[in-house]
Image: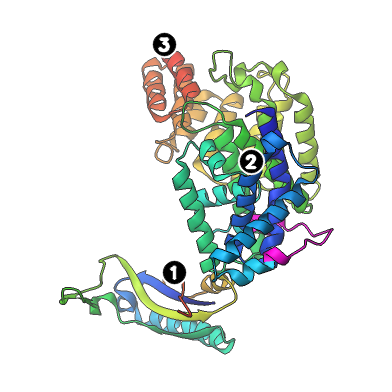
Amino acid sequence: MSTAEAAISRVFREEAGRLVGSLVRRVGDFDLAEELVQDAIVEALEHWPADGVPANPGAWLALTARRKALDRVRRNARLAEKLQLVAASEAPPEEADDRLRLIFTCCHPALAREAQVALTLRAVAGLTTAAIAHAFLANEASVAQRIVRAKRKIVRTAIPYRVPTGAELAARLEEVLAVLYLMFNEGYLASSGPAPTRPPLAEDAEWLCGLLANLMPREPEPLGLLALMRIHRARALARFDAPGQLVLLQDQDRSLWDHVLIAEAGKLIERAAAMRRAGPYQLQAAIAAVHAESPSWEATDWTQIAALYGLLLRHLDTPVVRLNRAIAISHVADAEHALELLDDLAEALDGYHLFHATRGDLLHELDRPEEARSAHRRALALTENPAERSLLERKLVF
Amino acid sequence: MKYMLMFIGESEGSDAMAPEDLKAMYAQVGEWWQKHSEAGVLVGGHELQPASTATTVEPRTGAVTDGPFVEAKESIGGYGIVDAADLDTVIAMAKTWPASSKVEIRPIVEGN
């Protein structure tokens, strides 16, 4: 992406969600409002790279969306009334930020996860369908289809345009955070495809999470997820060596870590912790922070990490969390005990490469080379990420 | 907007339940039904006889066969018609349905 393109994307991020949000509220048709803004974005991409970004890009996009609405009035009698409404609407000067409602609608649990991700990127972060398809290495037509279906479902089933309240909020917020974390992970560590990382997607996810944290200042979990993303990003430079091979946390050059970013994440965790409502993202961020603040691998406070994983289990009891707790325990207790904890997870994690990779490492430590090799071979067969593959292949040489 | 709630459960339906459990379940269902009817949200619906009583007709060929259109462990045991403002209202209502394992919500096509 060129600098000009990146600057334009940043403008879209700031303006697109606001515009979609206010149009949905005024027109009452999510599908139509989102479509008009997307049309305006596509038109901006035709003009801005050559003509430059206009002085007031938000107003330019709003005006273009209005013109698009007028064009459609002539072609679409059924929607004429709503379209006239858009065409006639002047945005009040200091309009309330509607993006929080927009986020909750895009991440409604009645939509499939892939659709939630694509729709959030398009409607809230102002990405084009082409950019989303590129980020997910997917076919543009199928991404477009997914978005069309999701928007149709929002309209046809009357998915409300509101922020849930009361008891409903916790579960719905969890859904939003899951969408953002999946988006971030896709960008940070791609599960398949030739490039090991896709930074723009991770950046969009982090921006969205920051927006969410600002819009919900009384909720600790968005801050927790934001801190977690920051710490991951702080270590990004050290994660791959010059030939593009994945470097394990223990072997990373910690001077390459962005310690300013790590300190910032620490402050976010403290702000969240002051609200005294622990949650899975805050705890994962705290675990990542213990690693990030440790001067060396040897100095890692494994007792604290094992304890934090113990707390995390109360919120998120998954085999992967149990696996990570077992790894932490293997550093404070003996490998034998850790292997026992691991073997309890054999059935649940048989398809997970990190389970076999960890098992291989423990078996190696216990001087059981044959079993270690077979576990590493199994891990290799289970991952497609080129950097992780080459790491496992190197282990198998010995 | 109107929605159809399809109450999905084991295909043998209430035939497989112990009489006292059945009685308790019907009491809860009755309460649920009355509450939402009185609120004007639930505007219609019925319990259906088990899937084993189904007859399927294919109008194009005139074929008549015994059984539901798709053989499955679970099937629709009843339905309700709901008139509500939005999907969230219906989801909240479906979460409190006292019988059967799943509730499928489908918007009804209106006005054409």
Residue A213 visible in the shown view:
no
Residue drawn at (66%, 19%) of the image:
A297
Residue shown at 52% from the left, 36% from the top: A134
- Callout 2 crowding tier (Cα within 10 Å): few <14, some 14–19, many ≥20: some
Nearer the observer, disc 2 or disc 1? Answer: 2
Q: For the residue marked with disc 1, what is the amino acid?
A: Glu
Query: Distance between the Cα atoms at labels 2 and 1?
Result: 42 Å
Verify whether residue A101 appears in magenta.
yes
* Residue denoted by label 3: A397
As shown in the figure, which amino acid type bears the numbered disc 3? Val
Q: How many marks?
A: 3
In the drawing, does residue B14 fall left or right of residue A197?
left
State how far apart marks 2 and 3 are (Cα). Answer: 50 Å
Badge 3: chain ID: A
The residue singled out by tag 1 in the image is B104
Residue B16 appearing in the image: yes
* Callout 2 amino acid: Leu
For the residues bearing labels 1 and 3, Cβ distance under 8 angstroms = no
Residue farthest to the front, as pictured: A74
Percent across and percent down for residue B59 are: 21, 76
Q: Which residue is mark 2?
A: A45
What's drawn in magenta, residue-wise?
A86-104
